[in-house]
Amino acid sequence: MSKASDLPEDAIPWLHEVGRVIGRYLYRPAFRFRVHHMDRIPMDGPVVLVANHSSMIEPQVLFGILPRRSVFLVKGELFKGIAGHGLRAIGQLAIRRGEPDRKPLLAAVRVLRGGGLIGVFPEGTRGEGDVLNAEQGAAWLVRQSGATVQPVAVRGTRRPEGSGRRLRPVVDVLVGKPFELTVGPGRSGLAAGTEQIRTALADLVGELDRMRDLR
């Protein structure tokens, strides 16, 4: 079977498409989704998507609703047994958090250079997904590929502490404006690029919070 250049080498394209359909509809019985500005997602070319992360639901939801194929960096603990085989088959990449792990990052660069989209959930989130800091993987990918940065904010998947059972709560997905980023050389360039990405995502999360407060 031929492989698509916007997916990892061991991905099965038709299974990837099946996974997208499942992700698109899996949580609709449990949540009401409001998606804002999905038309901002570039439909071609290399993209590094960064999103806040407060539960296991966000990766599946974004994988399903994005209008193009996407490959997410997923924590390696999930790549066990049948689930791990399934994640690899639909083109997701396992990454070890908190330690050097260049193999999946190099695979992600190949996807980006093939015109694909890589999704990253930066570390350092707390509570309902407040972006406090970020690991440097996203900035490194941008530096290696020249990809566009696409911030996305998600709110509503996690039940607030102390609240009771919720009946089909609203989940908002806000797509920010994509932007180009020049990541300079060395560690200082990587740190500066990471801070620019973190700030853009934090600002978008704040914008979504204000939108939700007004409703």
Image (spheres, grey):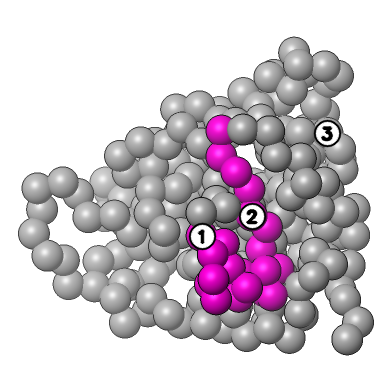
| Element assignment for label 2 | strand
Q: Position of residue 175 (x, y in %)?
A: 56, 53
Q: Residue at x 57, y 62 (%)?
A: 79
The amino acid type of the residue labelled 1 equals: Leu
Disc number lying in front (2 or 3):
2
| Residue contact between numbered discs 2 and 1, judged by CB atoms under 8 Å | yes
Q: Seen in the image, is 86 located left or right of residue 22?
A: right
Q: Position of residue 37 (x, y in %)?
A: 56, 59
Q: Residue at x 63, y 48 (%)?
A: 95
Q: Residues within 10 Å of mark 1 (few under 14, many from 20)?
A: few
Corner quadrant of residue 12: bottom right
Q: Which mark is residue 45?
A: none
Q: Residue at x 8, y 59 (%)?
A: 164
Q: CA distance from mark 2 to mark 3?
A: 21 Å
Front-lying residue, 137 or 156: 137
Q: Seen in the image, is 186 located left or right of residue 152?
A: right
Q: Residues within 10 Å of mark 2 (few under 14, many from 20)?
A: many
Report which residue position mark 2 lands on.
Answer: 94
Front-lying residue, 5 or 85: 85
Q: Residues within 10 Å of mark 3 (few under 14, many from 20)?
A: some
Report which residue position mark 3 lands on.
Answer: 143
Q: CA distance from mark 1 to mark 3?
A: 28 Å
Residue 26, compared with residue 163, is above or below; it is: below
User: Which residues make up the magenta segment?
Assistant: 78-98
| Element assignment for label 3 | helix
